Amino acid sequence: MKKIEISKICLSEEEIGAAVDVMRSGKLRQGEQCEAFEREFAQKVGAEYAVTSANGTAALHLAYLSFLQPGDEVLVPSFTFIATGSIVTMTGGRPVFCDIDPETLLIDLKDAEKRLTKRTRAISPVHLFGNPVDFTAIEDFARSHGLKVVWDAAQAHGATWRGRDVGSADDFVAYSFYPSKNMFVGEGGITCTNSRESYEKMYYMRSHGQTGKYCHTMLGLNYRMTDVEAAIGRKQLGRLDAMLAERRKNADALTRGLASVRGIRLQKTTPYGEHAWHQFCVSVDPADFGCGRDILAAKLKEKGIASGVHYPRGLHQQPIFEQLYGPQELPVTEAVAANILAIPVHHGLSPEDTGRIVEAVRECRI
Ligand SMILES: Cc1ncc(COP(=O)(O)O)c(C=O)c1O
């Protein structure tokens, strides 16, 4: 029985060739390839500027380093990967965890509004699993409360809302190129912005705040990407649309096959959004489906189908955040975390594979 993996991480011959060319040239550090990747990525997503970095966490960190002050608060959805929240703490701020919408699984602005204080400085919407957050709602919210927006697009390469690429938004858009993502170069990140001032700060802070040879006019870190990864990224940008088209086709097949299964709930795509399907997640209602998420995962494994739990708890339930900020209850996040399961949707699946996944999930219903 062929195993169906949860992601497909396979560089193309062209990407491998581009990486080898850089290795042969000996120019391994950040250089021409990174510069070209920044230009091409910014152009692709419709941003003015882009700064490559070592990973998606660094891409978020550079954004915060450019404006956040100690004690500032940032509104963050609780249902996301640790980095969305931890990087705020690591920059001296405080993430304020908000609940999510039960259908789109994205930040619930009504809940966020209740958590505004005099110290709130920014909001960090996450395009979770590739589902684009409604730009207008966030932009209106941010404008009316004087907030910066740090979009976490780590999972959303290619997602659009009303035809606008998520990368074109103000103020900062941070992506990851970790191997499981829609674009994958090894380790890598990029932060897009439309502000020249933010771009320059992030540009210098990425490399020790060096504005001239051994002249440091601000403090920074070494968050540089290497040209090997940038060369892979440049080539991969050329096949992003094709990979996304595969993901979307697979998601359509899974949706058609599973939407009517009792006890299974699918993530609702934001109205006017085009989902990038980094993950295809189902929420399992044990009462209606006959078994819970963990049993479904075990049964799928027996049938050779991998799955993953993203995420088993909200950030407010992470031991370190409970220790730092005390206990908190966010009912929607907690209910979703208890029941959610990601099933394969990646660009390497065939129609037979998606058919097998649908059948397998249906067979597991008791
Ligand atoms: C939502 C989200 N934010 C941030 C990151 C951090 O990216 P990286 O792992 O490249 O540091 C990830 C990666 O898993 C992520 O999924």
Image: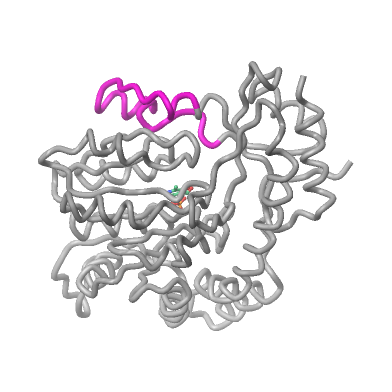
Give the x, y percent position of residue 314.
42, 31
Question: Which quadrant of the figure has residue 276?
Answer: bottom right
Left or right of 69 on screen, residue 12:
right
Read off the magenta span: 310-335
Residue sitting at 25 percent across and 28 percent down? Answer: 324
Q: Nearer the viewer, residue 72 or 108?
A: 108
Left or right of 289 on screen, residue 87:
left
Question: Which quadrant of the figure has residue 172?
Answer: bottom left
Left or right of 70 on screen, residue 235:
right
Give the x, y percent position of residue 166.
43, 62
Give the x, y percent position of residue 319.
37, 25
Residue 366 against residue 44 in the figure, above or below: above
Q: Quadrant of the N terminus?
A: top right
Residue 284 against residue 308 in the figure, above or below: above
Q: Is residue 326 magenta?
A: yes
Residue sitting at 33 percent across and 28 percent down? Answer: 320
Q: Which of 331 and 238 is in front in this view?
A: 331
- Name the outermost residue toward the left: 118
